[in-house]
Image (cartoon, rainbow, N blue to C red):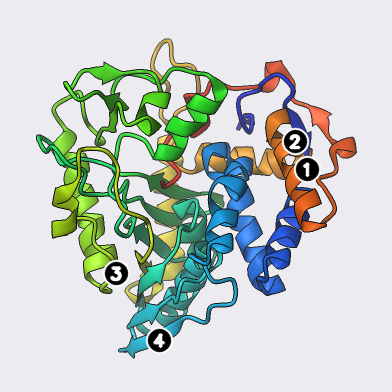
Amino acid sequence: MTTVASAPSATGTVRVPYADLIRFATDVFVACALPPERARAAAEALCYGDAAGMDSHGLANLTRLYLPLLAEGRADPRAEPVVLADRGAAVLVDAAGALGLWQAGAAMELAAERAEQYGIGLVSVRRATHFGCAGHHAARVTGRGMIGLLASNCGRQRIARPPGGAVALLGTNPWSVAAPAGELPPYVLDMSTTAVPTGRVRAAERAGRAVPEGWLAGPDGRPVTDPGAFDRGEAHLLWLGSGAGGEFKGFGLGLMVEVLAALLPGAGLGPEPAALEGDGRPSGRDDDIGVFALAISPAALRDAEQVALEARTLFGTVLDCPPAEGSSGPVAYPGWHEARRTAEAHRDGVPVAAPLLAELASVAEQFGVRPVSVAASVPVSAAASVPASAAVAGTEGGR
């Protein structure tokens, strides 16, 4: 199989050793009072976005999201989640505001432990915080031969309007499903239920790029391609399927996530009476997020080796599908491109743009940690880059 580049190249983009990025992010989180093991897990979840080609959900969010959450006390670095109800295969957890980059992985691990006992494990979480790429956490269980599902609402943060509605009621409500594929890379579907997550809109704004029609619409319903219009309140985010008459599919999936991730554990709801006072623009805050973590063990139902063989057949057949005439690349399934980019990033370094490197250097100075080892970096070859559209093939990377 051919190797797909980790991310689109840009002027001043370099490859930074993966281990050094993990070390840097871990050091910063430790400086913010996270215990070392949690800090390491949070760093891996954060840097996964950069390594897998979803830089809108990577280290760019360190200063934009996670450090402010910790500084404002909206995320508690030393919070101890509490089990409120334990029914064996089903557990209700109060995350107590723990940093989601760590806590979501812990919830998936607990779900997997219960699945080993009961064949299925559900961990329902309230008072959670933003956890980055859902796929990173859901895929944790594939190494155990399990299927993982992770979903999250956005607490009381409302970003998207229902079809035909005048006020925002729901967040981007991401979810991910991951499954082992034999010796092939795991299947990892990671998507928002809106057309794209807000992180991709803001990444386009930082890069000075227009966004495609179908992502944003103005008050009159007409397409908007200026990404800055979203944060200026001049455009709203559309649902998955919008523009083709399928917006109720995306909206319906968003409501599904709200039911599973928020209604079930008793987390903050997007659609509640206070939302009706909105003016159409995003409102509320993403505190008291709800998380739905599910692990399923096929071995509890039938022979594990047979399941693995059939999974290899399923996903291998997808890869063997001949490409259509004029296709720019091989046929693949969600998770395949990300696995190739991640392997390349671990081997050759993670692509990091110069402005982000400068930002990380400021963070290092602020927290008194060793900066990223730029001297060990190498420029990203333009010949090795892929189009921005290919960089997120089959995935949306959560919020």
Cα distance in 3D space between marks 2 and 3: 37 Å
Residue type indicated by callout 1: Ala
Q: Which of marks 2 and 3 is nearer the N terminus?
A: 3
| Mark 1 lies on residue | 361
Q: Could you say which is closer to the camera, residue 20 or residue 67?
A: 67
Q: At which x and y percent is residue 279? A: 20, 39
Q: How crowded is mark 2: few (under 14 residues within 10 Å), some or many (20 or more)?
A: few
| Mark 2 lies on residue | 358
Residue 198 in sight here: yes
Q: What element carries label 1?
A: helix
Q: Nearer the viewer, mark 2 or mark 4?
A: 2
The residue at the point 66 percent across, 21 percent down is 10
Question: In the image, is residue 211 above or below residue 172?
Answer: above
Question: In the image, is residue 305 above or below residue 198?
Answer: below
In the picture, residue 128 is in which quadrant? bottom left
Q: Residues within 10 Å of mark 4 (few under 14, many from 20)?
A: some
Cα distance in 3D space between marks 1 and 3: 37 Å
Cα distance in 3D space between marks 3 and 4: 15 Å
Q: Could you say which is closer to the camera, residue 98 or residue 239?
A: 98
The residue at the point 46 percent across, 77 percent down is 110
Q: Do the residues labelled 2 and 1 touch (CB within 8 Å)?
A: yes
Q: Could you say which is closer to the camera, residue 168 or residue 95?
A: 168
Residue type indicated by callout 3: Ala
| Mark 4 lies on residue | 83
Q: What element carries label 3?
A: loop
Q: At which x and y percent is residue 369? A: 82, 56
| Mark 3 lies on residue | 267
Q: Earlier in the sequence, mark 2 or mark 4?
A: 4
